[in-house]
Image (cartoon, rainbow, N blue to C red):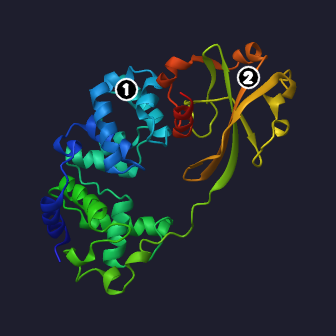
Amino acid sequence: MDFSKELINWYSDNKRDLPWRNTKNPYYIWLSEIILQQTKVDQGLSYYNKFVSHYPNISDLANAKEDEVLKLWQGLGYYSRARNLHFTAKEITNKYNAVFPNTYENIIGLKGVGEYTASAIASFSYGLVYPVIDGNVYRVLSRLFGIETPIDTNKGKVIFKNLAQELINKKDPATYNQAIMEFGALQCKPKNPNCETCPFLLECAGFQNKNISNLPLKSKKTKQRNRFFNYLVIEENNTILLNKRTKKDIWEGLFDFPLLETKKQVKELKHLPLSSLSKDISEKNITIKNISSEYKHILSHQKIHAIFWHIKTNQHSLLKANYTVANIQNINKYPVPKLIDNYLKTIL
């Protein structure tokens, strides 16, 4: 079996027409790869177009304000990607005079760029022979070759890396890399793969052994922890208090409301740790306008259970010093997590 030839033939007949495939500009390719991490193409395409429109080159992105970048990213999740994107644009501007580096070693040295992204940029932009290995590639190779070594172990990573290096088309690594990722996305899908029309059906060990649904293997499952958020929505004179998240936690750099986190769900004001906001604030200072139902927001390692307490307080002036006072009419200019955006849509 000439795997590379068969794969590229499949790709030429089935590939999607995507804008980052019609360029060798490393900035655009880098942009697309960062956006498409943890994001499906259908969702990522509109964000790619927005970023290219707002920031046509690296210098434009480097000179942007972080809040603007995060606002443009809003809804994509995994916001560290956006912060790293912005940081790296500034690094390339300062260190490489706004010219994207053209060696694998320098590319992988950029913040937010791992082996997969560096291989993609190196091959797509510069024709360098570095195989990409992402979730699609793990799935295709594990099924086709019947590899049952878990992909999240050092041994598994070495096996797949060596196999990928052996299979890549040395004369056209860019097309090969695009092809194997597209094959995993469209043909050898995680669920309900199109096995009957697969060009590798007769050679596929996973299919022959009726083991497709189990591959690739992982040694451990992701554990989720529950967190209970109590947001205080504090309004006064057409303004609302916002909190900019600065700690090393989820949504760093985004805005939410003053937050009280508890160990379990709280339904009465007296059970909230109000003193952590200010030693002068208590139940006596607060009038409840509304308590929302629970909003659930699921992240990769966390499940957020949020309740929004819409309140009035005579201690508003005391709290203003610690928060951002936003005009309600302008609140949409602030970058917020999807959870907060969903709530805002109910009150604006």
Tell me the quarter of the picture where residue 210 sits: bottom left
Q: Residue, x 62% and y 60% (percent of image)?
A: 223
Q: Residue, x 49% and y 38% (percent of image)?
A: 79
The quarter of the rendered structure image containing the N terminus is: bottom left
Q: Residues within 10 Å of mark 2 (few under 14, many from 20)?
A: some
Looking at the picture, how far across and down is residue 58, in whole percent? 31, 27
In the picture of the structure, the residue carrying the numbered disc 1 is 95
Instruction: For mark 1, give the secondary structure.
Output: helix
Tell me the quarter of the picture where residue 256 sits: top right
Which dot, 1 or 2, sits closer to the camera? 2
Q: Nearer the viewer, residue 255 or 123?
A: 255
In the picture of the structure, the residue carrying the numbered disc 2 is 312
Image vertical order of residue 188 relative to residue 127, above or below = below
The residue positioned farthest toward the bottom in the image shown: 209
Q: Nearer the viewer, residue 74 or 110?
A: 74
Q: Do we see residue 241 in this rendering?
A: yes
Looking at the picture, how far across and down is residue 138, in whole percent? 37, 65
The residue positioned farthest toward the front in the image shown: 289
